[in-house]
Image (cartoon, grey):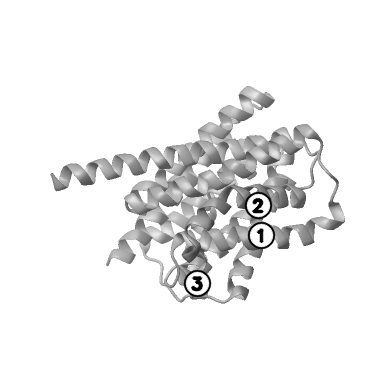
Amino acid sequence: MRAEGKSERVTAAVLFAVGAAALAASDAVIVRALDGAVHPFVIAFFRALFGVLMLLPFVALRPQVLQSTHTLGQHAVRALFKLFAMVAFFAAFSVGPLADVTAIAFMSPIFVVLGAAVLLGERPGLSMFLAVVVGFSGAMVIVGPSPSGFTLAVGLALGGALLQAAIQLILKSMSRGDTTSTLVVWNLLLTVPISLALAVPFFAMPGNRELALLALQGVVGTSCMGLMTHAMSLAPASIVAPVDFLRLPLVAFGGFALFNETIALTTVVGAVLICLAALMAARSRGVKTSN
């Protein structure tokens, strides 16, 4: 019975992760559908605002979720990093092929490995080293031989992946004192005023169509975080994390179906290498943590 229950939890976790991947892909498609009509900082503000509105009932029912062992300043720094990562990806999705940007975004676990080695003194093993080599090879396949080469979209995606890696390294210490729910709630609550302050120079009230898309994005983004958080609580990260790679073909399909984007062979090959490297890095870190 115990084995059967564990199997059911793993199955449920994978299903929740599939839902999160689908919502994450929808997030990228929504940004492209905005077609540059809304500045990335303004997108980030409305995304956080609608996300908080969706989250308020949960906070009202469970006010203890606001209890944190960390200072407001620590949460604010993480929120700022998260904001700039979002803005980088929003800008990249606005100007570049969705599949290319999404593939480059999967470089984040590779940057986490490098950051842990440089900042935390971790010594990467052979599998970690191979993951870094394979990951950068994949990125070079996408960037180098492609007709467009190193574009603004690729640069923004790399910047977003670097910031995302920095967030993961910050979370490595913060998650020891706070629950995931507390970290998510504080991140959204602080992102609203911070993003509003940064959006003021670019602010223009979106039209009805854009406002509807932004509201949808807020619901999608918050739901995505909730699904992935719940998936992680049901099964090990080594099982759940690889499901996120489903986001790439979903994004590519959305770009093709809605925006007539073609997918270059270099993108496919590079994406496979990057996903393989990210999987190697995730599994290697998981084994190291277990040990």
| Number of disc labels | 3
Hey, what amino acid is under mark 2? Ala
Sequence-wise, which precedes: disc 1 or disc 3? 3
Q: Residue furthest left?
A: 1
Which x, y percent locates residue 147?
A: 70, 35
Which x, y percent locates residue 189?
A: 62, 60
Tell me whether the residue at label 1 lies in contact with that at label 2, contact meaning CB atoms closer than 8 angstroms: yes
User: Which residue was labeled with disc 2?
Assistant: 48
10 Å crowding of disc 2: few (<14), some (14-19), many (20+): many
Position of residue 187 relative to residue 270, above or below, is below
Q: Which mark is residue 191?
A: 1
Which type of secondary structure does the marked residue at label 3 adopt?
Answer: loop
Which type of secondary structure does the marked residue at label 2 adopt?
Answer: helix
Q: Is residue 96 visible?
A: no
Tell me the CA gap for discs 1 and 3: 17 Å
Which x, y percent locates residue 70?
A: 52, 75
Hey, what amino acid is under mark 1? Thr
Residue at horizontal 48%, vertical 41%?
20
Sequence-wise, which precedes: disc 1 or disc 2? 2
Residue at horizontal 59%, vertical 55%?
161
Tell me the CA gap for discs 1 and 2: 6 Å
Hey, what amino acid is under mark 3? Ser
Tell me the CA gap for discs 3 and 2: 20 Å
Front residue of 88 and 271:
88
Sequence-wise, which precedes: disc 3 or disc 2? 2
Front residue of 241 and 225:
225
